[in-house]
Amino acid sequence: MPEPRPRIGLTGFASRPPVPNAGPSASDVPDLGRALDLLSGLRLAVLTGAGLSTDSGIPDYRGPGSPPRKPMTYQEFTRDASNRQRYWARNHIGWSHLRHADPNEGHAAIARMEQRGLLTGLITQNVDRLHEDAGSINVVDLHGRYDRVVCLDCHREYTRTLLAGMLTELNPTFLEKALAADVVEIAPDADATVEDDGLISTFVVAVCPACGGVLKPDFVYFGENVPKDRVERSYAMVDEAEAMLVAGSSLTVMSGLRFVRHAAKEQKPVVIINRGETRGDDRATLKLHSGVTESLSWLADRLPEL
């Protein structure tokens, strides 16, 4: 029997709470030893995906047991006001959940690697900003940030906290009603599912305080291109590195996969840590089907100084 889908309170987690790092299983240690041999003495470019944040209580997109998800595309968001209404209603609920997430031991392990000078940089496909909260500095938020919004008309930027206040003022009882209507399935981009279309239809969408224009989350939608400067900065990290470490990404989308292909083309070792298959497995020097948090912590504690 599948597990029941999670329900959330207005401020609490219901997916997976942060878990303590119990260390890798005995069966994973031999593969981790091989990863350590491959990566020791080399500066690393690190690429992370949603699988790293699951131990912070944020469900991933495509991991084992994840429900099917169909994120809204950029074209759907921009062309239809009713789509924007549905999106912001769901995001308002998801934000009340996601903003309480804390970094886990995997995020902390990567930050320790950076502090020790082992990394050329970190490329993350996640929008949750948990790497920065854990202390990582040289980070490319490849798909943007969930804590900012941008006006598509005047291009001003606002914090998501400011928008949350605006949305709450416009919809003072919405969160309570959404909870009663059965809220399920929080996604990594702060989306949520509400099993009540009537409730969605009452949601009032905020507009840009400066120009009255359309507000959009400051992250890359499906069907939207990653900004060129982020891509170039990411390639530079891979070029400067002597090996690449991928953690918690299925590499399903080309935005991340291209860096793995680039590293492999340059004949740099590529180690992938992910439960389940990835699109980059055929380019990996070593693939580990093991827990991301435990594996990163194990490696960070053992990689030697350069």
Image (tube, helix red, strand yellow):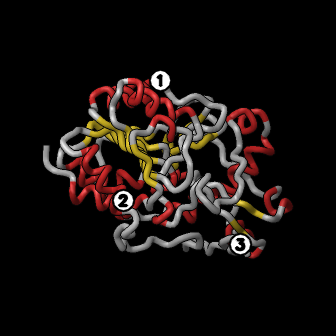
Question: Of callouts 2 and 1, which one flags the residue occurring earlier in the amino acid sequence?
Answer: 1
Mark 2 surroundings within 10 Å by alpha-carbon count, few (fewer than 14), some (14 through 19), many (20 or more): many
Residue type (three-letter) at the residue carrying disc 2: Ser
Quick one: SS at disc 1? Answer: helix
Name the residue: 62% across, 38% down: 221
- Quarter of the figure with the N terminus: bottom right
Residue 196 placement: quadrant: bottom right
Nearer mark to the viewer, of 2 and 1: 2
Quick one: SS at disc 2? Answer: helix
Circle 3 is placed at which residue position? 2
Say above or below: 139 vs 30: above
The total of numbered circles placed on residues is: 3
Residue type (three-letter) at the residue carrying disc 1: Lys
Circle 1 is placed at which residue position? 228
* Residue 295 numbered tag: 2
Residue type (three-letter) at the residue carrying disc 3: Pro
- Quarter of the figure with the C terminus: top left
In the foreground, 19 or 130: 19
| Residue 212 percent coordinates (x, y) | 65, 37
| Residue 24 percent coordinates (x, y) | 37, 67
Name the residue: 55% across, 74% down: 12
Quick one: SS at disc 3? Answer: loop
Mark 1 surroundings within 10 Å by alpha-carbon count, few (fewer than 14), some (14 through 19), many (20 or more): few
Question: Of callouts 1 and 3, which one flags the residue occurring earlier in the amino acid sequence?
Answer: 3
Name the residue: 59% across, 56% down: 63
